[in-house]
Image: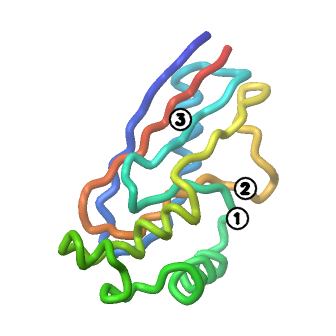
Amino acid sequence: MRTHTDYLTFNTSARQEIIDITDSVEACRAAASVSDGFVLVSAMHISASVFVNDHEPGLWKDILQWLEERIAPWDADRYRHNSGTGEDNAAAHLRSLTIGHEVIVPVTGGALDLGPWQRVFYGEWDGQRPKRVILKAMGV
């Protein structure tokens, strides 16, 4: 079995941002020369996410609006975490928990085996500081 590990570092200009990282996932797969296996993609921070969805900016706006209005509004006074730690990012933790922090992308025939509209994204929910994502390709 072949393996390869890469790390991506993000320091977003905005507190919340969605970034397409599919090309980096493919580069990790290629570096491992994996033709059959998978690539694990995992955010290494508890206020960020990794997910698979459509590469469509309107959808990204819908996701951000859904998180703000229905899942975890950015309202520092409403969360015990914020009052107990002095931080203001409890909403980011809840958003990460909702979206998830990792995905496994299958590899078949020497390519990422994604659906026709699927891409891999990094979701930053409390940015403007360095955060990492691990990419680990494994297979034959």
Identify the residue at image location x=41%, y=66%. Answer: 93
Residue 86 position within the rendered picture, expressed as x and y whole percent measured from the top left: 18, 74
Which is more foreground, mark 3 or mark 1?
1
Based on the displayed image, in which of its 4 quarters is residue 76 positioned?
Answer: bottom left
Q: Is residue 85 left or right of residue 100?
A: left
Q: Image height check: is 128 above or below 31?
A: below
User: 121 or 94: which is nearer to us?
Assistant: 94
Instruction: Tell me the amino acid under the disc marked 1.
Output: Asp
Evaluate if marks 3 and 1 touch, with contact meaning CB atoms under 8 Å apart.
no
User: 124 or 116: which is nearer to us?
Assistant: 124
- The residue singled out by tag 2 in the image is 118
Query: What is the CA distance from the residue labelled 3 to the residue labelled 2?
Result: 17 Å
- The residue singled out by tag 3 in the image is 27
Identify the residue at image location x=72%, y=56%. Answer: 118
Evaluate if marks 2 and 1 touch, with contact meaning CB atoms under 8 Å apart.
yes
The mark that comes first in sequence, 3 or 1, is 3
Residue 71 position within the rendered picture, expressed as x and y whole percent measured from the top left: 56, 79
Evaluate if marks 3 and 2 touch, with contact meaning CB atoms under 8 Å apart.
no
Q: Image height check: is 110 above or below 19?
A: above
Give the secondary structure at mark 1.
Answer: strand
For disc 2, the neighbor class at 10 Å (few under 14, some 14 to 19, many from 20) is some
- The residue singled out by tag 1 in the image is 54
Query: What is the CA distance from the residue labelled 2 to the residue labelled 1?
Result: 5 Å
